Image (spheres, rainbow, N blue to C red):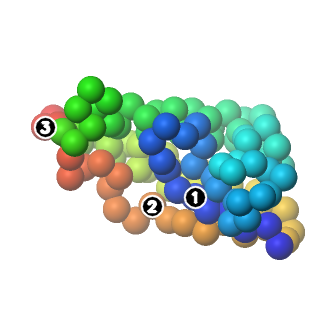
Amino acid sequence: MVILRFVFSYGVDTMLWPSDMTSPLGFPCETRLLPFSEQTRADIDRLAEWYQSSLGWDDPGGPSPWTTQESESFDAQAKALLGRIRSKLPPGWALLGHVSEPCRVARAAPG
């Protein structure tokens, strides 16, 4: 069984991580090696890149440059992508993870 985890991380260009650190998919997963359509892979790449902008890289401990609206939009798209990936997994694959809370609202800038 192939088990993937759905976890965003700063400085990483995907949110998909295999449970096995020696996976042929890479650690984290290399998007091009995943059994998804080009569109799904592009959406994974786009959302992972977007996530990187939620951190104020000049002041990582400070507030996020995202507004509450941008944070909510990101979370909605992350939930949708998580569901879409789950629906497209081949037999013998599982995806662990969830997007249950706003990603950055607690640190988002007003507006």
Amino acid type shown at disc 3: Pro
Between the C-alphas of marks 3 and 1, the distance is 28 Å
Secondary structure at numbered mark 1:
strand
The residue where tag 3 is placed is 110
Image spot of residue 110 (x, y percent)? 13, 37
Vertical side of 50 occupied by 73: above or below: below
| Residue at 52%, 56% in the rendered image | 7
Image spot of residue 52 (x, y percent)? 43, 35
The residue where tag 2 is placed is 99
Q: Is residue 18 visible?
A: yes
Residue 20 marker: none
The residue where tag 1 is placed is 6
Secondary structure at numbered mark 2:
loop
Vertical side of 96 occupied by 42: above or below: above
Question: Which is nearer the eye, 87 or 48?
Answer: 48
**In the drawing, does residue 110 fall left or right of residue 29?**
left
**In the drawing, does residue 74 fall left or right of residue 2?**
left
